[in-house]
Amino acid sequence: MSGDRGAGATGVDPQQLWLTSDQPRRGRRPAYDRAMITAAAVALADAEGLDAVTMRKVAAQVGAGVMSLYSYAPDKEALLELMVDHVSGELPTTLPSTGDWRADLKAIARLQRALMLRHPWLPAALSTRRTPGPHTLAFLEHALAALRPTGLDGAAKLEIFAQLTAFVAGHVSYEIAQAAVSRSPDRAAAEARYLAAVAADGEHPELAEALAAPGRPLGPEDTFTRFLNRLIDGLDSD
């Protein structure tokens, strides 16, 4: 997001953001609220990307003055926090655990991937530290319950969830980039010619051997499942 005043030196105050009402204590109820502002920002990001989200554009979407929005989201970092938690509300949190924690983690990862593909700006938004809001905390609670059969301590379970989320965010970013390449046949062909030339120069025998190996299914679902299995199946519950 650009064109807005930046976050203060101390960053977003999570208690003020998540535990304080956004409604005025006195006077007439405003025509918009924090949820409407956040939904407008999410719609902008979905349509035009994260950089397109500014307080001015969001204000125009809800029919408000720019300065009035700062009482709901004091800066762009706070708005981004609200946006992340807003879309996290799309994640189901009532699915029962199967008792097979690896299978449950894989199901959680697939839910996260689907969410990030619906909102392609989300991986970038998660690249910096975020304070979990109510929807994010509900999904975290679901993930920690799925990890209960491991017997791991709380810190280890939190680390696993963070590792899983980082993996999914990174992979979705890769998927989005690959999709962009696939929409440009000339670029894809140029990259293939380049790799073939490098493999044939005698300087990269390991790469040449790897490129000569039989191919694997390259569909997005197949690739994600393959990588996810490697990650989850290799986790140690000791």
Image: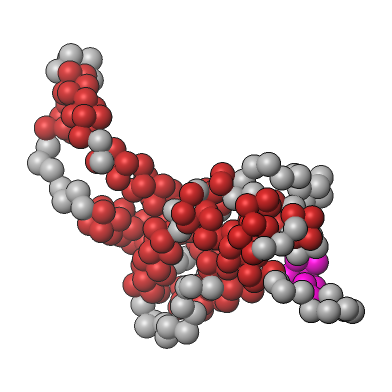
Residues drawn in magenta: 14-23
Q: With 30 as the anchor, is 3 left or right in this view?
A: left
Q: Is residue 21 magenta?
A: yes
- Whether residue 12 is visible, yes or no, is no
Could you tell me which residue is drawn at 53 percent across and 68 percent down?
88
Which residue is at the front of the view, 10 or 40?
40
Q: Is residue 3 above or below residue 111?
A: above
Q: With 35 as the anchor, is 14 left or right in this view?
A: right
Could you tell me which residue is drawn at 59 percent across and 50 percent down?
53
> Residue 65 in the image: x percent, y percent?
75, 58
- Whether residue 57 is visible, yes or no, is yes
Q: Is residue 196 above or below residue 54?
A: above
> How many labels were placed on the picture?
0
Q: How is the image coloured?
A: secondary structure
Which residue is at the front of the view, 144 or 2?
2
Q: Main secondary structure of the magenta part?
A: helix
Could you tell me which residue is drawn at 15 percent across and 48 percent down?
216
Could you tell me which residue is drawn at 30 percent across and 45 percent down?
179
Q: Give the quadrant of residue 187.
A: top left
Q: Give the quadrant of residue 178.
A: top left
Q: Is residue 19 magenta?
A: yes
Q: With 231 as the anchor, is 86 left or right in this view?
A: right
> Residue 167 in the image: x percent, y percent?
43, 53
> Residue 62 in the image: x percent, y percent?
64, 64
> Residue 17 in the image: x percent, y percent?
75, 66
Which residue is at the front of the view, 221 or 188?
188
Outermost right residue: 26
